[in-house]
Image: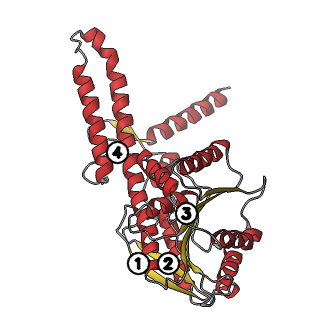
Amino acid sequence: MLNQIFKSIIVLASITALSISTLVPSAHGETEEKPKSTQDKNTQSTKPQPAVERTKQLTEAQAWYQRMQTLGASLDGQSSQSQLINAPVTTQWIDLSPTKDLPENKLLIMNYDNMSKPKGNLLVIPPAGQLPTEPDWFIDFINQITTYGWRVYTTGIPKFQLPNPLPPFDRSNLKVSTATKNKQAGKDEKDSQKNNDQPQNTNDSQAQPTTAPTNTTNSQTSKEKVQAVYLDEWTQDAKARALELLKYSATQPQDGKTIILAFGQSAAIASLAASASNANIDGIVLFNLKLDELKDEDQEIINQQLAQQKPVLEMLSQPKPQTEQAAKRRRLAADTSGNRQYLIFELPPGVGLGASNGGWLAKKIHGWAFPITYDE
């Protein structure tokens, strides 16, 4: 019995000694606990790690621009696609004004010319965000349309995309066109006058609830200003690309007609370019024209221009009801203004513009352009 008691005392003393050994005197005479093994692991994990280089995420416009540079470098007659196209291709690079996404901004124009039976110049702008060679129908279209005798000059425009997250409005580094600035200034002046005309409430308890809606409105207004600035910059850059394509065509042989073919957002931009006073074109083909992302004043300019433009072929593929109705309104406006050369052609239900329809599109455009009677 005594032996068991003695053994228990020894075990208890050992445990006590072990506990005391984990404590060390501090500089102030107090005791502090030594880091345990788990704390060592945590300490090691918080040490600075070697910097890892990360590839900067490109905006959609920057990725599109890189593809354009790659395409331009490959058009030497050696690429697999070049070997599938009958018409020889030459390229032209043109400097453009820089944008926020594209500090080094250039335009690539591709010239396809079979140099036989000249019928005219066809200026092609594919859907925004695509390069001329990227649509499925491109190869068959080029082979067929050049066989008819058309020279094809083509370029692309980047797709409009707001930055995410949207930066705050800063007048020092955001630029806006004069038209947009004047419109916004008039709106701000009206809002300010409206606020000044309202009676001021000096009762703090009653004035407090109006604070939140005012801040929310200011935040929304700031966001709208930023969006307007980015949309305005994109519109101006895209329009500059379309105008440069028109200028380039004007320097080429003029032994036929000059027709524009454009798609979606690009069709809207092409319509804006066609409204320029020095735009010398004989017709425009719009495939699934998309105006909804443009400013109201630009949409109005386009609709007015198309009502006067002779001739216009608006092509629709699987349109939404509102898209079809908008096209009919444009044709009605053209009829009202005396323009009988605004035509709408809708593809059969379920039929889109795919790889097998490039030749059909070329035949449709050529048949529409020749023969054609112009009202002088």
Indicate left or right for 223 with 159 as reference.
left
Front label number (4 vs 2) = 2
Is there a contact, CB below 8 Å, between mark 2 and mark 1? Answer: yes
Q: Which residue is mark 1?
A: 94
Q: Which residue is mark 3?
A: 129
Q: Is residue 82 visible?
A: yes
Indicate left or right for 307 with 78 as reference.
left
Foreground residue among 236 and 99 = 236
Against 139, residue 40 (above or below) is: above
- Name the residue furthest front: 376
CA distance separating discs 4 and 2: 36 Å
Front label number (1 vs 4) = 1
Is there a contact, CB below 8 Å, between mark 1 and mark 4? Answer: no
- The numbered disc on residue 109 is 2
CA distance separating discs 3 and 1: 19 Å
Indicate left or right for 51 with 88 as reference.
left
Mark found first going from the N terminus, 4 or 2 = 2
Mark found first going from the N terminus, 4 or 3 = 3
CA distance separating discs 2 and 3: 15 Å
Q: Which residue is mark 4?
A: 168
Mark found first going from the N terminus, 2 or 3 = 2
Rate crowding at label 1 as few (under 14), some (14 to 19) or many (20 or more) other CA atoms within 10 Å: few
Rate crowding at label 3 as few (under 14), some (14 to 19) or many (20 or more) other CA atoms within 10 Å: many
